[in-house]
Amino acid sequence: MFTPMEETKKTRAVLLMAYGSPNNLSEIEPYYTDIRRGRKPTPELLEELTGRYAAIGGSSPLLRTTLAQAKSLEAQIAGYKIYVGMRHWTPWIREAIAEMKADGITEAVGIVMAPHYSSMSIAKYIENVEKAQELHQSDIKFNFIESWHDEDLYIDALIGKIAEAQLKFNEEERKHLHYIFTAHSLPERILAIGDPYKNQLLETCALIAGKMGISDWEFAFQSAGRTEEKWLGPDLLEVLDENVNKGIKSILVCSVGFIIDHLEVMYDIDIEARNHLAQKNVHLERARSLNDHPMLSQLFAQLIEERFASL
């Protein structure tokens, strides 16, 4: 016989969300079309993106890593079922909502695998959930965790990855090591509406630097979209050039805005940025992404339990 708490848990769940990524090269065009709100990419844009995915092996580990994180999280919060939904590819958020409704879920906590809030990122996931609820005539009560950029477990997990990357430099290089923190760029117009994205990113970096005693650091944006409007900068490649001109020889990059190794880190940093520095006698290393780090599932479990406790 179930206790009242066990009965309650049967109708409560967690929706873990991520951006989505094609599983193979044949899925890139429809995936790209969805990102472009139904407009097919030009042959040139499609060729460029296909080439990037081919360079990292034909697919991204985004989905399998998210599923692994979901499994780890489920073990942390036994009793709540974890559903996974992607914004731009399968398994879609709308599919997760349909499954949750069919399973009798009445209350849920939603969390995105991205630490920093923006009206053009986290808010879009929430909109997707709301549209999916309308589509499936679902009335699940959602409580969204919109930001976790300053949580100790997240900061400490990143510090651990940075410490691992430091060991890839010799003793002399570590004495003069320059740190660059990065995140995905967004259109600059978000600043005019007071979007907290940039400030949250800088707060994350300051927390890391403060705990590690790092003074020689800066922030750069990466992976700007191919549109005519101005995107947030400075761009990583421009910052790398500036460092080369200053005579800096050892650089450690940490992508605080990406917690999973996928295209934007595996290509934009590991391949493009490294190639950009080729023949310039600069040693560049990237701190590995957190991926399915156990401290992340601990953090998510903590935040989720707090939200359920407030319902």
Image (spheres, rainbow, N blue to C red):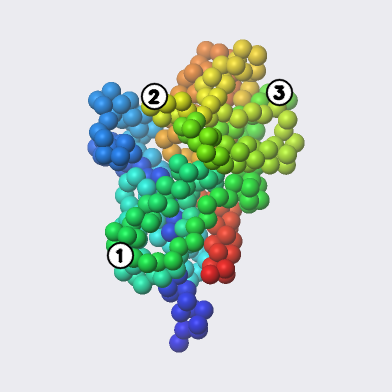
Left or right, residue 9 beside residue 103: right
Between circles 3 and 2, the one closer to the viewer is 2
Please name the residue that numbered disc 1 is placed on: 137
Q: Position of residue 108 (x, y in %)?
A: 45, 65
Q: Is residue 51 above or below residue 79?
A: above
Q: Position of residue 273 (x, y in %)?
A: 49, 23
Q: CA distance from mark 1 to mark 3?
A: 58 Å
Q: Secondary structure at mark 1?
A: loop
Q: Secondary structure at mark 3?
A: loop
Asked whether the viewer can see residue 271, the reply is no
Left or right, residue 67 beside residue 282: left
> Callout 1: few (<14), some (14-19), or many (20+) C-alpha neighbours within 10 Å?
few
Q: Earlier in the sequence, mark 2 or mark 1?
A: 1
Please name the residue that numbered disc 3 is placed on: 176
Asked whether the viewer can see residue 309, the reply is yes
For the point 56% across and 39% down, the residue is: 194
| Depth order, front residue of 117/158 | 117
For the point 50% across and 16% down, the residue is: 278
Please name the residue that numbered disc 2 is placed on: 228
Q: Position of residue 121 (x, y in %)?
A: 46, 43
Image quadrant assignment for residue 264: top left
Image quadrant assignment for residue 56: top left
Q: CA distance from mark 3 to mark 2?
A: 38 Å
> Residue 126 shows which numbered tag?
none
**Residue kind at label 2, given as amino acid type:** Glu
